[in-house]
Amino acid sequence: DQQVKQNSPSLSVQEGRISILNCDYTNSMFDYFLWYKKYPAEGPTFLISISSIKDKNEDGRFTVFLNKSAKHLSLHIVPSQPGDSAVYFCAAGGETNFGNEKLTFGTGTRLTIIP
Amino acid sequence: SQTIHQWPATLVQPVGSPLSLECTVEGTSNPNLYWYRQAAGRGLQLLFYSVGIGQISSEVPQNLSASRPQDRQFILSSKKLLLSDSGFYLCAWSLHRVGSPLHFGNGTRLTVT
C-alpha cells in the first residue's frame, strides 16, 4: 500500500516559470511532510518541510502548501532554474513510539527545466 | 557541522557473495541511523533504522541485516547476495526529534551479477 503518492513521474517546465510538484497521502496520522531533491548518483538533499499545523511554508524560491482535508501537498519553485532539474521526493512522517523519525517516501517526480 | 560518509560508491558483486556497506556520521552524537534502498524506477524504501547502539529495527523481511557497533557507525550486511539485492543503497541520519529531517549520504550503487 503506497501511503505517499507522486502521480506524475515527470514534469518539464520552461526556465523562469513556476514548477509545481504534487504529492498525495492516505495516512491521516502523518503530521509532518518534507521535500527532497536528488541528483543522479547522489543522496537526496533536504529542501523544505511543513508541519501539519501549518498550511504554507516558504524558503526563498521554494514554497510548500499543505491541504490536510484533501491530504495533498505541493511544492512550488519560482522562478525555475536549470539547476532545479532533478528528481523530487515527497516524504511524510509522524511520531512513533520511540520518537523516531521514520519517513515514508513517494516514488519521485523528475523535473526538467528547459532553458 | 555534521557530515555523513558512506562507502564504497559503487560495487559489483556475484550472486552468493557476502556484502558489507559502511556508514559513519561525524559532528553529532546518538543520531538515529537509517538504511534505505532505491530500486530502479522506484521510490525510497526503508530497510533498517536504529535509535541507539545495538538497537536495530527491520522494516521489511529480506536477505539483509544491519548492525550498529558504535554510536555513529551503521553497517549493512548480507551473507549471500541475490540478484534482487541490486539497487542504490542510502545511509541517513537524523536527530531524535519529531520533524527532524533525514540527511543522506551519497549512496552505494550495488550491482549483483
Image (tube, coloured by chain):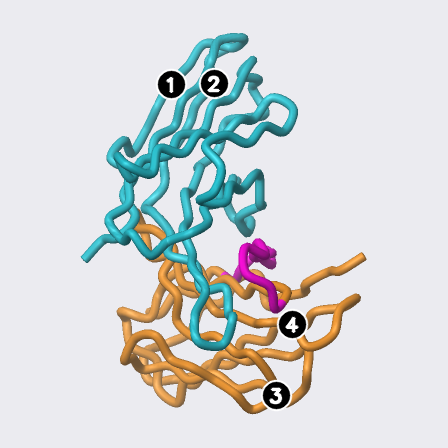
Chain colours: A cyan, B orange
Label 1 Cα crowd, 10 Å radius (few <14 / some 14-19 / many 20+): few
Q: Amino acid at mark 2?
A: Ile
Q: Amino acid at mark 4?
A: Pro
Q: CA distance from mark 1 to mark 2?
A: 6 Å
Label 2 Cα crowd, 10 Å radius (few <14 / some 14-19 / many 20+): many
For label 1, the residue is A12
Residue visible at 38% across and 80% down in the picture: B58
Report if the CB atoms under discs 3 and 1 are less than 8 Å apart. no
Q: Is residue B101 left or right of residue B14?
A: right
Q: CA distance from mark 1 to mark 4?
A: 37 Å
Report if the CB atoms under discs 1 and 2 are less than 8 Å apart. yes
Q: Position of residue A29 (x, y in %)?
A: 33, 56
- Co-location on one chain, circles 1 and 4: no
Among numbered discs 1 and 2, the one appearing first in the sequence: 1
Q: Position of residue A71 (x, y in %)?
A: 29, 39
For label 2, the residue is A113
Indicate the secondary structure of the residue bearing disc 4. loop
Q: Amino acid at mark 1?
A: Ser
Q: CA distance from mark 3 to mark 2?
A: 43 Å
For label 3, the residue is B53
Indicate the secondary structure of the residue bearing disc 1. strand
Image quadrant containing the C terminus of chain B: bottom left
Q: Give the quadrant of residue B14.
A: bottom left
Q: Say which of marks 1 and 4 sits in front.
A: 4
Residue placed most toward the observer, B91 or A75:
A75
